[in-house]
Image (cartoon, rainbow, N blue to C red):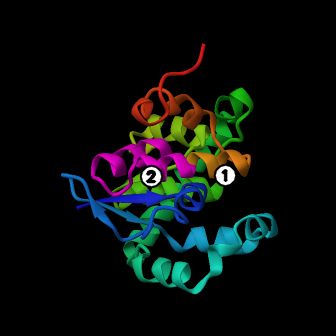
């Protein structure tokens, strides 16, 4: 079994259309989608996220998240805190490297999630390019959200109409990352066709 850990934005982008969003096992490698309580905490601390995703606290979504969250031992928590400190210190030592291209550098929560992926181990799903750069520096496995979506499609968890609906919703919400835009006519060419010239 390989844990696939969704960050907050990955969960929010997928959860309403990919049901169930967490706890499902898929693929030949036995991937299992999961989240950590930090996702819950981040949404509850942000009035903007609560407004933008009013479905987040609906009973069925909340129950699903609660039953499928990653559980950590006190030893794992200590290891994660130590790894987070190293990761965040690394970012602070060269903030410009992680903030280039208009992206924001990984903060403490981002570093904590990557540390969790390193300690557990798990593949972290995020569209945050700063997190991807940091993960690469430390050999932590990461996927973009569209890469997870492609693996879910290969495993027949989602199909073309769901992927098209998801892309439409992200566009309407102004939440379609550039990596997803690029994948639309390459990774998902059978669904969307080639890019118009």
For residue 178, what is the image quadrant?
top right
The residue at which mark 1 appears reads as 107
In the rendered image, residue 79, in percent from the top left (x then y), is placed at: 42, 64
What element does badge 1 sit on?
Answer: loop
Residue 124 percent across, percent down from the top left: 44, 52
Q: Which residues, given as a range, are shown in magenta?
A: 144-166
* Residue 34 visible in rendering: yes
Q: Between 192 and 48, which is closer to the camera in this rendering? A: 192
Residue that carries the numbered disc 2 in the rendered image: 124
The residue at the point 42 percent across, 42 percent down is 147
Of circles 1 and 2, which is in front? 2
- Identify the mark nearer the N-term, 1 or 2: 1
**Dominant secondary structure of the magenta stretch?**
helix
- Please say whether residue 144 is visible from this viewpoint: no
Mark 1 neighbour density, 10 Å: few (under 14) some (14–19) many (20 or more): some
109 and 173: which is toward the camera:
173
**Residue 139 occupies which quadrant of the picture?**
top left
| Quadrant the C terminus occupies | top right
Q: How many marks?
A: 2
Secondary structure found at label 2: strand
Q: Look at the image and say whether residue 36 sits in the magenta stretch.
A: no
């Amino acid at each position: 079994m390989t844990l696939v850990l969704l960050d907050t934005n990955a969960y929010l982008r997928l959860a309403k259309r990919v049901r169930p969003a967490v706890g499902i096992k898929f693929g030949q490698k036995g991937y299992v989608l999961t989240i950590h309580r930090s996702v819950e905490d981040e949404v509850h601390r942000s009035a903007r996220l609560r407004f933008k995703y009013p479905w987040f606290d609906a009973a069925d979504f909340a129950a699903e998240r609660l039953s499928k969250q990653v559980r950590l031992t006190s030893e794992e928590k200590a290891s994660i805190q130590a790894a987070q400190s190293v990761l965040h210190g690394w970012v602070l030592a060269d903030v410009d490297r992680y903030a280039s291209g208009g992206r924001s550098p990984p903060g403490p929560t981002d570093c904590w999630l990557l540390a969790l992926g390193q300690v557990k181990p798990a593949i972290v799903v995020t569209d945050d390019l700063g997190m991807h750069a940091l993960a690469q520096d430390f050999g932590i496995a990461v996927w973009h959200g569209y890469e997870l979506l492609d693996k879910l499609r290969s495993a027949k968890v989602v199909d073309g109409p769901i992927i098209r609906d998801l892309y439409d919703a992200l566009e309407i919400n102004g939440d379609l990352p550039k990596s997803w835009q690029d994948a639309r006519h390459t990774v998902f060419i059978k669904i969307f066709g080639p890019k118009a010239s």
